[in-house]
Amino acid sequence: MAVQNELDALLRPAIEALGYEFVGLEYVPNPKNRLVRIYIDRTPEGVTVDDCVEVSHEVSAVLELEDPVAGTYSLEVSSPGVDRPLFSLDQFRRFVGERAVVHLYTPLENRRKLDGVIVAVEEDRVALEIDGQIYRVGEQHIRRAHLKPDLQALIAGQ
């Protein structure tokens, strides 16, 4: 987690200085194939391949200079997509009313995966409604999370 926090602190300002929203990053420390995956966005127009290339060049320069990742690694820059990952409570707050899938470090009522509607963010917890029941999850218990779009509605809206 230390490398991921260092990468976040190092890359967020550089990406935001280019005019993009820094959605978040994932760091996979596999010794044979380390991965730094960065998600960017721009409202309202979204992100193009050219945007990803621009950010990739900037991030590569910063990583080359600062060298926070030991050994070789792959760098990916991407839009968050329709199943947007959620990295912070502010992002959960932004999508209240939307369906999300939340993976937990430890089970909550025998569930490691919660699939429900974000109904609120209360201090350091996210409240999800699943089958009429409210589950409150502390931010520190969330391993990863992403939106779960209604694909039928997306298809119908095209």
Image (cartoon, grey):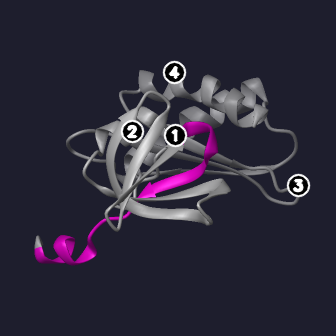
Q: Mark 4 packing: few (<14 Cα in 10 Å), some, or many (20+)?
A: some
Q: Earlier in the sequence, mark 2 or mark 1?
A: 1
Q: Which residue is mark 3?
A: 31
- The x and y percentages for residue 61 are 64, 31
Q: Are marks 2 and 1 in contact (CB under 8 Å)?
A: yes
Q: Determine which residue is flagged by label 2.
A: 91
What mark, if any, has residue 13 been given in the picture? 4
Q: Secondary structure at mark 3?
A: loop
Report which residue position mark 1 lands on: 24
The crowding category of the residue bearing disc 2, from other C-alpha atoms within 10 Å (few below 14, some 14 to 19, many at least 20), is: some
Q: Secondary structure at mark 4?
A: helix
Judging from the image, what secondary structure is the residue with disc 1 in? strand
Mark 2 to mark 1 CA distance (whole Å): 10 Å
Place of residue 109 in the rendered image (x, y in percent of width and height, measured from the top left): 59, 61
Magenta segment includes 150: yes
In the rendered image of this protein, does residue 138 appear above or below residue 146? above
* Residue drawn at x 38%, y 61% as measured from the top left: 116
Residue numbers of the magenta segment: 138-156
Q: Position of residue 35 (x, y in %)?
A: 71, 52
Do labels 4 and 2 touch, CB within 8 Å? Answer: no
Whether tag 4 and tag 3 are in contact, CB under 8 A, the answer is no
Residue 60 sits in quarter:
top right
- Choose between 98 and 156: the one closer to the eye: 98
**Residue 58 coordinates in the image, percent (x, y):** 55, 32
Q: Nearer the viewer, residue 122 or 5?
A: 122
* Label 1 vs 4, first from the N-terminus: 4
